[in-house]
Amino acid sequence: MEILQTEDRGGEVIIDKYYDGIRFPANIPGNVKDQLVSVKNLKHTKGDVFLDTFPKTGTHWAYEILYMLQTGKAEYSSDPFMCLEFQATDRLDAFEGPRVLKSHLYPQHIPKFVEDGKCKVVYIYRNPKDTAVSLYSFIKRVNVNGLKGYNGTWEHFFEIFATKPMHYNSWFEHVKAWLDFKKENAEIPILMVSYEDMKKDLRSCVKKMAEHLDVKRNPEFLDEVANKCQFNVMSKAQRSNVKETTLSKDGSNPFYRKGGVGDWKNWLTVAQNEMYDAMLQEKMADIDLEIKYTL
Ligand code: PPS
């Protein structure tokens, strides 16, 4: 494992732990390798669901939906697990299901039982412009190792987000890795859902997820899940989540901000947008996925 620093044009740095080709946020425990070995060997429990995302693309949102669908109760998880790579896995092994295991891991690092097709997988993706805005806003709000020192401007941050590897390498690499994994492993039940589709028609996405998990839930229950997981309702309920508010500089919950599609228009300058769109044209040639930037 190596400690790597990504330096922006203003000299501000984001620190990562680099291991096995991937840059992990510096708050991942220890030498990374031991944590990944524990994750790989995690025990399978009946009813497990595996949720994977690139950071800031709807992890908490999908987690609550999947948790409600699995438990059959339209109640928020009172003690959501952290992402697998940050979590003591003995606690997970001791947990009586149903578990929704969330992570930002690349396919090569997911638990063995997930690779073996033993549980349902959901991958959420979000357009990279809104993802960049959300990540920058998060980094400015939190007080966790490896992030708290970063005090760069949006202009400088966006430049590194677009052009340099940082947490989990890059949005493009992550989405491509999961698309390829899905294509190459047709026997693994993977459902890909976009943040934008969830925003546009949450009820339909909740139904799609319930069908994917193969849980029989009546229409009223699906309505209730969709209602409870709307941004306004869910963010209000999570406002004082102690586990999460302690991560922020100001005591707010840093995992909730605007929860919308298209806020990037308020952040990207015309020049930034043109630069990124030119890049997208080239990079998206490899990514067979429709990405929506507005609703
Ligand atoms: S993390 O740190 O990777 O787990 O963050 P993640 O949960 O993936 O993403 C945080 C963004 O998701 C928004 N969010 C929601 N949007 C719509 N509806 C609901 N219910 C919801 N819950 C969380 C959250 O506000 C962050 O996006 P931004 O754009 O910053 O608001």
Image (tube, rainbow, N blue to C red):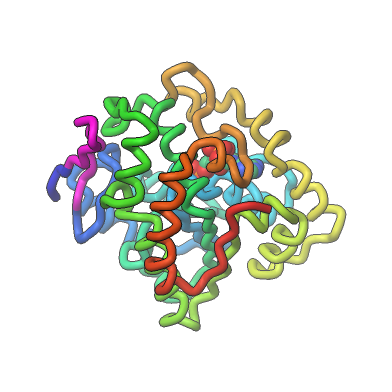
Q: Main secondary structure of the magenta part?
A: strand
Q: Foreground: 163 or 270?
A: 270
Quarter of the image holding residue 158? top left
Identify the residue at image location x=31%, y=25%.
151
Q: Quadrant of ligand 1?
A: top right
Q: Foreground: 289 or 118?
A: 289
Q: Residue furthest top?
A: 250
On the rendered structure, is 128 left or right of 70?
A: left
On the rendered structure, is 189 left or right of 7?
A: right
Give the answer, above or below, for where 285 lies relative to 72.
below
Q: Is residue 80 visible?
A: no
Identify the residue at image location x=60%, y=45%.
262
Give the answer, above or below, for where 285 lies relative to 253.
below
Return the x and y of residue 96 as percentages of the image width and height: 53, 51
Quarter of the image holding residue 75? top right
Give the answer, above or below, for where 251 lies relative to 26.
above
Return the x and y of residue 126 as percentages of the image width and height: 53, 54
Q: Foreground: 53 or 92?
A: 53
Give the answer, above or below, for where 24 lies relative to 141.
below
Return the x and y of residue 288 as percentages of the image width and height: 49, 74
Q: Foreground: 164 or 25?
A: 164
Magenta region? 5-18
Identify the residue at image location x=73%, y=35%.
233
Return the x and y of residue 175 as percentages of the image width and height: 43, 63
Q: Residue furthest right?
A: 220
7 magenta-colored: yes
